[in-house]
Amino acid sequence: MKAVTNKVTLIALFLGLSIQPLLAQEQIIKDLFETGNEKKYAFYASTLRMVNLTKNKEYNELVNGIDKLLVYSLDSATIASKSYKKVADAYLNEGFEEYIMAFGGDINIALIGKENKRANEFAGYTNMDGNTFAFYLRGSIAWEKIPSLLKSIRKEEFLTFLP
C-alpha cells in the first residue's frame, strides 16, 4: 500500500511541476488586466467551434489545437494610458519572441510567442474598430489555414461575443 501511495505522490508531483510553468505564463496577462474594469472572455476549442454556424472546415481546423484563449476587452483608461503595451514587455522578459509589432495610424498590434514541445503560447494586443483587446493563447494554431479562411469567411457565419 505504501508503494502505491509513493507512486501516486511522485506522479502528482511530476504533473504539478510540469503544469505549473504553463499556468505562470497565463498569470502574467491576468495580473495586468484583471482589474474589474474590463470584459474577460475565455474560449476553448469546443467553444470556438460552436460559434462557427456554417461549420466552415478551415475555421474548425484552425481552432482545433487551441487549449485556451483569454481575451480582454480593455477599458478606456487602459487604452488612454497605453498600459496594454506592458503585455509585450512582460512576455518578452519571460523568454517569448517577438512575432509581429506594428504601430502607426490605425494599426496597433503586437504578437509575442513561445513555441515548445509541451505547449505553444502566444500573447499580445490589438486595436480593432476602435476597440482594444489583449489576449493570451495556449495551444497550436494551423496558421496556414488563415489565408483560405479569410477568403471564404462571411461575418454572418459566426456568432459574435466581442463588441
Image: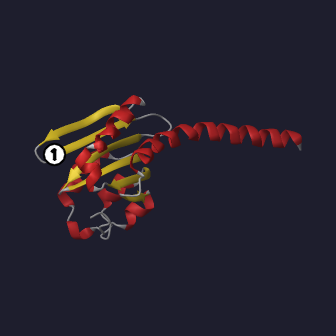
Secondary element at image label 1: strand
State whether residue 134 is above or below residue 160. Answer: above
Q: Position of residue 8 (x, y in %)?
A: 76, 43
Q: Residue at x 26, y 55 (%)?
A: 76
Location of the N terminus (image quadrant): top right
Query: What residue sits right under mark 1 in the picture?
Result: 107
- On the picture, is 101 further left or further right than 72? left
Q: How many marks?
A: 1
Tell me which residue sits at (20%, 65%) in the image: 154
- Residue found 19% across the figure and 38% down from its top: 102
State the residue in front, 89 or 60. Answer: 89
Q: Residue at x 29, y 40 (%)?
A: 85
Q: Which image quadrant is residue 83 in?
A: top left
Residue 105, image x, y percentages:
10, 44
Query: In which quadrant of the rendered image does the C terminus lie?
Result: bottom left
Q: Residues within 10 Å of mark 1 (few under 14, many from 20)?
A: few
- Looking at the rendered structure, the kind of residue marked 1 is Ile
Q: Position of residue 84 (x, y in %)?
A: 30, 44
Q: Position of residue 59 (x, y in %)?
A: 31, 58
